[in-house]
Image (cartoon, rainbow, N blue to C red):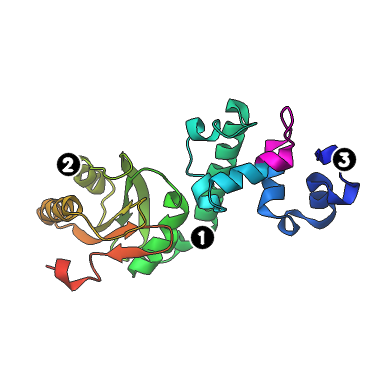
Amino acid sequence: MKIQDLTTGERPRERLLERGAAALSDGELLAILVRTGSRGCSAAEIARNLLSVAGGRLSCLFSMSVGELVEVEGIGNDKACTLLAAAELGRRFMSEGAGMEKKPVVSARMVYELMKPLLKGLDHEEFWVLYLNSARYILGKEKVSVGNGCSTSFDIRRVVKNALDRRAFALVIVHNHPSGNPAPSQADIRQTKTLGDACSHFDIALEDHVVICDDCFFSFAEDRRYQG
C-alpha cells in the first residue's frame, strides 16, 4: 500500500503535524526521512525493511555505512545520506544537551553519560581525550584517533603536547568498543600505562580511561586491578 492510499490521519507527515513527532513510531519517522518510495515499494515499506535489517534497533541502523544502507531495496545514496545526517544530528544534539560539561567530572559514570551520545552505535573505535583543569571542569574534548571495528591507537606525544598547550591539570581518555564488551584489551592496557607514564613526567594526572559500549562501560580507575 502506498502512503497516498492511507487516510490523511494515517499518513506520517500529517500525523506529525497534528500530534507532534513524539507520537510517531520509529517506522513512521523513518518513512518521513525516506520521503518517497521506489517501484513497487512505498516509503513506509522501505522504512520497515530498514528496521528489519537492523534488528529493530536504531543504534544498529545508524551505525550502518552508506554501502550497507544502499543494499536495502529502495535506498540510494541520497536517502542513505539523509539517514546518516539525521543520526549524526541526533548524536550532536544529545551531546550538546547533556549539560555535563558545566559540572566537574568526578566519576566514570559522568564520563559515560557525557560521551555516550558521541560514541553510541558506531561501527568503529574512536579515542577521545577530556582535558580537565584543577577543579575537574572540562577545558575541552578532542577526538585523537579513529580506528577500525576492533582496535585503534593514538599519538601519545600529541595528547601530552595538547594537554600542555591547554594547561590541563588532568586527563581522562575515552574510547568505545563496538563489540558490546567493555573489557579492556591488552593493547588498551599498554596504551593506558604508557600515557600515564608520559603524563607523570609533566605533572599531569591521568584520571581515568573509560571504555564505552552502548549500554555499559568499564573504568580503569574504578577497577583495582589497574590502579597504580
Q: Residues within 10 Å of mark 1 (few under 14, many from 20)?
A: some
Among the two numbered marks 2 and 1 on one chain, the one whose residue lies closer to the N terminus: 1
Q: Quadrant of the C terminus?
A: bottom left
Residue that numbered label 1 is attached to: 98
Q: Left or right: where does residue 101 sit relative to residue 167? A: right
Secondary structure at badge 3 equals: helix
Q: Quadrant of the N terminus?
A: top right
Q: Give the amino acid type for the residue marked by disc 1 in the picture.
A: Ala
Secondary structure at badge 2 equals: helix
Front-most of 115 and 180?
180
Distance of mark 3 from mark 2, alpha carbons?
61 Å
Residue at 53 percent of width and 43 percent of height: 88
Q: Give the amino acid type for the residue marked by disc 3 in the picture.
A: Asp
**How many numbered dots are placed on residues in this image?**
3
Q: Give the amino acid type for the residue marked by disc 2 in the picture.
A: Arg
Residue at 81 percent of width and 38 percent of height: 2
Q: Classify residue 192 by image quadrant.
A: bottom left
Front-most of 5 and 114?
5
Q: Are marks 3 and 1 in contact (CB under 8 Å)?
A: no
Residue 106 position, x and y percent, is: 34, 70
Residue that numbered label 3 is attached to: 5
* The stretch drawn in magenta includes residue 33: yes
Mark drawn on residue 157: 2
Q: Residues within 10 Å of mark 3 (few under 14, many from 20)?
A: few
Residue 129 position, x and y percent, is: 31, 50
Among the two numbered marks 3 and 1 on one chain, the one whose residue lies closer to the N terminus: 3
Residue at 73 percent of width and 53 percent of height: 21
Residues in magenta, as a range = 32-46
* The stretch drawn in magenta includes residue 75: no
Secondary structure at badge 1 equals: loop
